[in-house]
Amino acid sequence: MTPREWLSILGVLAGLLVGLPAIKACAFRFGSSPEFARKAVHVLMGLICISFPWVFERPQPVWLLAAVATFSLLAVRTVPLLRSGVGSALHGIKRPSYGEVLFAPAVAAVFHLSGGDPIPYGIPIGILTLADAAGALAGTRWGKRHYGCGEGFKSIEGSAVFLFTAFLCVFVPLALGGTTGLATALWIAAILSTLAMIAEGFSDRGFDNLVLPLGSVLVLERLLPLADAALAGRFAVLVLVLALVLTGARWSTLSGAALLGSALLGYGCAIIADWRYALPPCAVFICHVVITRKHRLTKAFDHRLDAVLSHAIACLPWVIGYGLGGLSFGTGLAGISFAMVVQLALLDVATRDAVPHLAPKALRSTLKGGLIAGVPGLVWLAADISKLLLPFAATLIFTLVLANLIKGISRKCEGHATCLWTIQGLLALIGSSPALLYQP
């Protein structure tokens, strides 16, 4: 560490030490709401962090600064005297939030991943601070139409303001910085701001402070090299997936956050890997909507984000494996198809067990999973059908065994929905492993 780096770290910490009491004093003087005071702190921290590319030349001092800031904020959270003093600007809200603890490590990670380049670094930080603050304050002030998010709610009005502000946070730096042309900046801003809005919509307890910046810098890295036509295609896929999810919302038992998570999962499968990778999870979602509407189950179940995370556990290893080049296209597509076969079969057994006039039928559910969730993806591998028969048969046998056992597993996990969904996702991933036997 050079003397200049130490002075820079001390200067940033001094700015925070002065800023927190100043915000507390202003909030008390003008009678501001706790939410306004908390977001004012986030904006202050963001404005300070925006200067890092011109202050630090390497990531090590930023990581050190993040460690010091995180431990300091943990002390403010846990020490009663500090919490009721300068910490009141951060902890004036009643709902639990870990955002301030996650903020500094997320900033350091973005600086590291972006190489300190002002635009790839500044865009995620702008979304994290300006868009998040604008959305939260707009939702608090004007929010009337709410959707579920974890243990609380968020508003459509707040999400709309977040979307608009995030769009500006992406478009303006790209357009004015000369990194891309105007058309390219427009497409990237449209895609990234929509994805950020979805991620913010299902993030709870301040975890958006981690999800938003890291997700933004990774997505931005993938979008910048693409041509306008490719960006337009990715935006079209995003709109289609989001429209599918929102259209089925009225007949879905998924909460608002879970619906947004479903859209992000489907889009992630299409963009990280290939658009055909989104077909199996989309087929499961459409089947879910049809069955829910048919049996009028919207008031009988309440599925939260855990259900989507279960599908993500089963899907993403295959998607990422292909995206990183570790798996062939066919193996990855077979894997995600097999995983959704298991998921749909287990969902069907659980649904039939919960509906009074229906009875669980393991074989029926297994065949239903194979047909509805398996075919949309496997049809693209029809040329190698002979090589697929053995792996597919192994998955169906494993699915049939699980369909007979899932009722007992559910009873052991009764009252622990997160545990049950996690186990189900892992079982689906294990059940899809015969796809590794398929060598196109």
Image (spheres, rainbow, N blue to C red):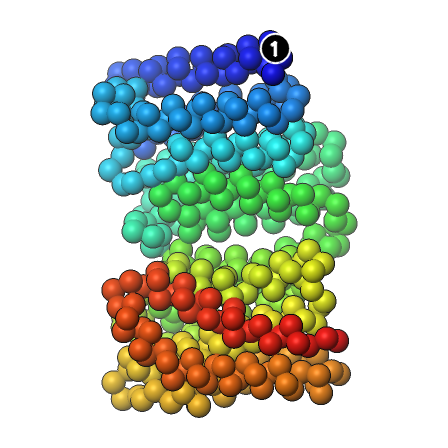
Q: Residue at x 50, y 16 (%)?
A: 12
- Which x, y percent locates residue 88? 27, 25
- Numbered label tally: 1
The crowding category of the residue bearing disc 1, from other C-alpha atoms within 10 Å (few below 14, some 14 to 19, many at least 20), is few
Residue 325 image offset from top left, x and y in percent: 72, 58
| Displayed quadrant of residue 232 | bottom right
Nearer to the camera, 358 or 1 = 1
Q: Quick check: 131 above or below 311?
A: above
Query: With respect to residue 216, does 367 lie above or below?
Result: below
Q: Left of 200 or right of it: where is 294?
A: left
Q: Residue 429: where, in percent of width, then height?
A: 52, 69
Query: Residue at coordinates 58% horizontally, 61% vertically from top-left?
Result: 317
Q: Is residue 62 left or right of residue 134?
A: right
Which residue type does callout 1 highlight? Arg
Q: What residue sits 75% from the left and 39% below the top?
A: 181
Closer to us: 205 or 176: 205
Q: Which residue is mark 1?
A: 4
Q: Can the viewer see residue 329?
A: yes
Q: Which image quarter is the C terminus in?
A: bottom right
Picture quarter containing residue 280? Answer: bottom right
Q: Is residue 168 visible?
A: no
Name the residue rendered at 67%, 83% in the picture: 388
Quarter in which the N terminus is drawn: top right
> In the picture shown, does residue 239 fall above or below 333?
above
Q: Secondary structure at mark 1?
A: helix
Seen in the image, is 372 located left or right of residue 252?
A: right
Residue situated in front as seen by the camera: 77 or 52: 77
**The image quarter in which residue 239 lies:** bottom right
- Given residues 240 and 302, the one toward you in this image is 302
- Residue 205 location (% of width, % of height): 35, 43
